Image (spheres, helix red, strand yellow):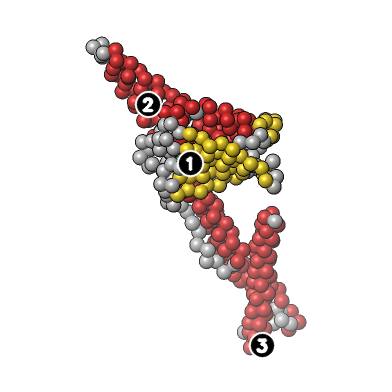
Amino acid sequence: MKRKDSFKRTSLIWLYFALVAVLILVIVTLIMSAVMFLLFRRGDIPPGPAGMFPLDFMIILGAVIGTVVAILVIKQIFKPIERLSKGLRRVSAGDFSVRLKEKSIFGAIREMYGDFNAMAQELAGVETLRSDFVSNVSHEFKTPLAAIEGYATLLQNKNLSSDKAQEYLEKIISNAHKLSVLTGNILNLSKLENQNSVPNRKPFDLSEQIRKTILMLESEWAAKNISFDLTLPAVQYCGDEGMLFHVWYNLIGNAIKFSEKNSAVRIGLQTAENKIYVTVKDRGCGIDEKTLPHIFEKFYQGDTSHSSDGNGLGLALVKRIVTLCGGEILVKSEKTKGSEFTVVLPV
Ligand SMILES: Nc1ncnc2c1ncn2[C@@H]1O[C@H](COP(=O)(O)OP(=O)(O)OP(=O)(O)O)[C@@H](O)[C@H]1O
Ligand SMILES: [Mg+2]
């Protein structure tokens, strides 16, 4: 459809050129003929051989005047193309702020300018995303690195008590762990973003995988005395087990992280109409209306001070994986009441 449109537009431009050229020729010839004929009748132009109208003289004069008029008109027609070419040169030099005014009388040129402006805007958006990503990555790396450097410097003090030394060592280890999680998440995300399909599909039991994930998170839920209400019937799913593990790990991890002590998390699994529904529901702090539209963005955290655990990459990863699996993720949340995330997967 798009190729057809662009072919139509190119043909339209050529048609304009051809029409304008023919129009110039016809107008110039008509005017020249009329003027010459009048002058000839008044006797201002000497007759040609055999007292006839001097056709050869008229052809030469017509060609000269016609060429001058054609050059002037074609120059006007080429102006928008010249403007477009200048704009393209600026874009290729990295200036994505350039916009062309869509004022031309030709519809095809207006459309072309519109397309150019849309392209420049899209490129500017991508560039902003890229530079935001780079500054977010550097910021997220800086904090644990500075902590490691600080505690390592403190450890150099020879008079340090063994308790303090132990405390600083633990801080170094925990910050190094944060860096390793962050690097792993960034690598995972960039790998998934360059992937268009699920490579290692094989059947496995989803309920078992979710149970194993809960066990892996034991230290976190045990520390907050969080209980689980599980409805997990055996459901076979054909997909990439390792990839889906990240989905449950992040969703259940968030439910635990954003719940108060002694809270309960409900996890349900069911199939209906050729779809699998996995729901993770908590009674934690919930998400307000302003935050909700952004939670799947990379590095976005509801707590904008980024003082809470994590880097805001978990849900971006989850969304990418679910999309790759051909599914979707739905969220319902209310501030102070809790959140419910539902992953819908095709069978
Ligand atoms: N269950 C939840 N309850 C309340 N808020 C949530 C919940 N899940 C996600 N959020 C909000 O969405 C934000 C983004 O979540 P995401 O999992 O991407 O990042 P994170 O958990 O802060 O960090 P990371 O996943 O990298 O450890 C969170 O910072 C939080 O504000
Ligand atoms: Mg998370």
Task: Tell me what residue is drawn at x 34 percent, y 26 percent.
Answer: 147
**Mark 3 — residue?**
41
Q: Which mark is residue 145?
A: 2
**54 w.r.t. 97: above or below:** below
Position of the N terminus by quadrant: bottom right
What is the number of callouts on the image?
3
| 220 to the left or right of 64 | left
Task: Tell me what residue is drawn at x 64 percent, y 79 percent.
Answer: 31
- Percent position of residue 188, x then y: 54, 32
Whether the residues at callouts 1 and 3 have beta carbons within 8 Å, the answer is no
Separation of marks 1 and 3 at Cα, in angstroms: 100 Å
Position of the C terminus by quadrant: top right
- Percent position of residue 112, x then y: 59, 59
Separation of marks 2 and 1 at Cα, in angstroms: 33 Å
Give 6 or 190, whichever is nearer the viewer. Answer: 190
Residue type at mark 2 is Leu
Task: Tell me what residue is drawn at x 61 percent, y 36 percent.
Answer: 232
Q: Is the CB of mark 1 within 8 Å of ligand 1? A: yes
Front position among marks 3 and 2: 2
Does dot 3 land on a helix, a strand or a loop? helix
Res. 2 image quadrant? bottom right
Mark 1 vs mark 3: which is more N-terminal?
A: 3
Q: Which mark is residue 15?
A: none
Separation of marks 3 and 2 at Cα, in angstroms: 96 Å
Q: Residue furthest right?
A: 50
Mark 2 vs mark 1: which is more N-terminal?
A: 2
- Percent position of residue 83, x then y: 52, 57
**Mark 1 — residue?**
282
